[in-house]
Image (cartoon, helix red, strand yellow):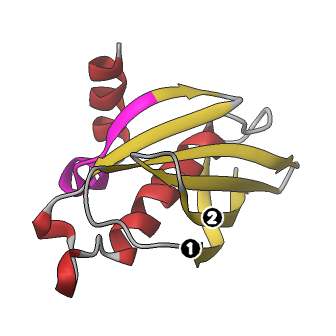
């Protein structure tokens, strides 16, 4: 099932394939994606790059927003994104779990938590998604 979801995600958002993200689950209540630690995704010192983490969160949040679009909408686009990094990632993987805080007619607000392989919160992202018509 996750292979099918990952294929679906890569087709809908080709950058997620370049990023190396995999889909764990996707539904209106929650979207969960994973990114494995890899040296090619790091800054100095073997720290997983913040841009990779933000891209993972944006993909999870965008998919979650898309699954919660109001009737008549054709798509969504990120308008704002605020990231708070809490701890570094130096091994394992990161899971991004996105859920809806607000679903309106013109915007959606998505909350995404990023946790490491030990389940520790490493970042929190709040983004506003515009509803496209």
First to last magenta residue range: 15-24
Q: Image point 60% across, 75% down: which residue?
A: 83
- Is 19 inside the magenta-drawn segment? yes
From the image, tell me which residue sits under label 1: 86
List the single residue furthest toward the left: 40
What element does badge 2 sit on?
Answer: strand
Q: Image point 42% across, 57% down: which residue?
A: 56
Q: Image point 68% across, 65% down: which residue?
A: 127
Q: Image point 37% across, 40% down: which residue?
A: 12
* Residue 40 falls in image quadrant: bottom left
Disc nearer the start of the sequence (1/2): 1
In the visual, does 123 lie left or right of 91?
right
In the visual, does 127 lie left or right of 97?
right
From the image, tell me which residue sits under label 2: 124
Residue 44 lies, with reference to residue 112, above or below; the image says below
Instruction: State the image coordinates of residue 122 (x, y, percent, origin top left).
Output: 52, 64
Instruction: State the image coordinates of residue 78 (x, y, percent, origin top left).
Output: 60, 65
Query: What is the crowding at mark 1: few (fewer than 14 residues within 10 Å), some, or many (at least 20)?
Result: few
Residue 41 lies, with reference to residue 98, above or below; the image says below
Q: Nearer the viewer, residue 85 or 71?
A: 85
Asked if the residues shown at circle 1 and circle 2 are in contact, with their CB atoms under 8 angstroms apart, the answer is yes
């Amino acid at each position: 099932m996750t292979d099918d979801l990952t294929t679906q995600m890569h087709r809908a958002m080709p950058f997620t394939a370049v990023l190396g993200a995999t889909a764990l689950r996707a539904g209106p209540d929650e979207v969960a994606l994973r990114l494995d630690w890899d040296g090619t995704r790091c800054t100095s010192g073997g720290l997983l790059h913040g841009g990779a983490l933000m891209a993972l969160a944006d993909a999870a949040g965008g998919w979650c927003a898309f699954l919660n679009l109001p009737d008549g909408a054709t798509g969504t686009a990120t308008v704002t994104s605020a990231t708070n990094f809490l701890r570094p990632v130096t091994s394992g993987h990161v899971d991004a779990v996105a859920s809806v805080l607000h679903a309106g007619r013109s915007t959606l607000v998505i909350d995404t938590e990023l946790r490491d392989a030990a389940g520790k919160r490493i970042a929190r992202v709040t983004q506003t998604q515009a509803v496209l018509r």
